[in-house]
Image (tube, helix red, strand yellow):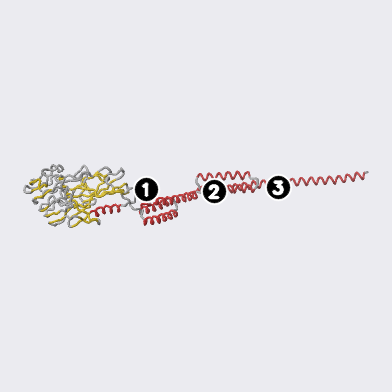
Amino acid sequence: MFRKMKGVLKKFTILRRFVLLVLCGCFTVAAAFSLAACNQEAGLAKYKTAAMSGLETYVVAKGEGNYSAEKWAGILAFVTDGKAAINTAADKPGVDAAVATAKAGIDGVLTVAQEDAIALAEYKAAAKAGLETYAAERREYYTLENWTTVEGLVAEGKTTIDAATDKPGVDAAIATAKGAIKGEMEIVEVDTEDMVDYLSFPRWPPSNAPGGVVVLNCSDENAVFECEVTKGAFALAGNPTQYAQKVLVAPGNSFRWESNGIPSGMVEPAFIDIVLKIGDNFIGHAVFEILGSTSSFTGRLLKSVLFPEIVGEYQNVTEEYVKSAIEKVKNTHFVELDGAHYVLANTEVSLTRYIGTEIDFTIPQTLMINGINRKVTSIGCGAFSNCTTIKSITLSDNVKIIDTSAFSGCTALESFVIPDSITFIGNYAFSDCTTLENITIPNSVTQVYSDVFDGWASVQTVYIQTHLSKPATWNDNWYRGSNAQVVWGVE
């Protein structure tokens, strides 16, 4: 029995030892697993810290100065969100994903340079489209040849725009291209009679006053008329003894011309050049001509034009173009032949001044001007005034007008016949023609102005065809200043 008990106790001791060994092993394994878990958690935290630090370093490397304030605030928001995602990540792959997402957001934010590049590209695209439109809107103002040139200028302008490195460079390219395109346009002129207004310009003896008032008109109050005379001078307003060769006239104001400084006798060709400007832009011009002598003269507008805006823009009219146009007006209407000056008035010609030395002179029926054979229809104001050597003047039957002082002071004139074509005789037309024995006024003359035979002596005779007394259309003072005999109703 004792041996049995002893055996049982031995077995129990062995079993207890086994259990103890098993229990110790379990405790050891549990402790090992707990330590591993602690180590893993500590590693993830450290990984997250490093990730957030790396994210901050990544942002600093981007450089705050490379972004606008708005965009930099956006970058900082990506950093904040990235850190929050890193903190909530359950493992390292989650941390890596959070970092990648934050960096992608940061990389998508545009720098100032990138924003400028996009804006510049858009600016260039708009500029090139605008250049095409600019040329297309003006298409009708180019010749076919010039339009081919314009297309080349547009292409060249686009290339220059593409090569520009900033907006000022684009603007400069546009301005250069537009200037070149404008330069190929045919200049548009519009004839106007409203710019120059002169209701009463003439002056005749015995008046010593300047010529009548010439008013200059323009609807734009910023405009200015630059006026210059080639002979004589402008009589300054309010001071008749002061003269100038050039004056500036505001719209609605006027000038008066005086023969000051011109030797006694010839005046024409005397011209007044009128240039209309707004700022540096030429918007019109006119040429006013003085006809007659220093003692009696009149004036007339030869031509006035405006340069209208094209598609809301002043035309590319240069000073050289305006000067050339003015000289062309003077030259194409004016002809000098055999000592006489002729000018084109509309479609007909007027003899405006004789400066020759011939004793006998015949006025031609027609004269070739600008390739057209035109009738000589009038003897201008003071045309033969004070020609003291001429003895005979013959008019053609194309002449209709003998203007103011046309033959005044022709003291050697012995032979003169008024043709039946004459309808008008101006003031002082034959004054002081003291050698002429007689003259006949034909029935064709419907208008006779004052003082026509001023200075004639009693030994001279004026014959009047058909009329038995002064016609109603003749000036009441037509005979004033004359002592000549008048014979009415001759055949």
Can residue 81 be seen here? yes
Q: Residues within 10 Å of mark 2 (few under 14, many from 20)?
A: few
Secondary element at image label 1: loop
According to the picture, the residue beneath numbered tag 2 turns out to be 108
Near-viewer residue (414 or 469): 469
Q: Is residue 261 visible?
A: no
Residue drawn at x 68%, y 47% as measured from the top left: 40
Residue of label 3:
36
**C-alpha span from label 1 to label 3:** 85 Å
Q: Secondary structure at mark 2?
A: loop
The residue at the point 84 percent across, 45 percent down is: 15
Q: How many marks?
A: 3
The reply to whether dot 3 and dot 2 touch (C-beta < 8 Å) is no
Residue 93 at what x, y percent from top left?
64, 48
Q: CA distance from mark 2 to mark 1?
A: 44 Å
Closer to us: 4 or 155: 155
Tell me the amino acid under the disc marked 2.
Gly
488 left or right of 348?
left
**In the drawing, does residue 218 fall left or right of residue 7?**
left
Sequence order check, earlier mark of 2 and 1: 2
Question: Horizontal and vertical percent for residue 136?
Answer: 40, 51
Q: Residue at x 55, y 44 (%)?
A: 77
Which residue is label 1 attached to? 311
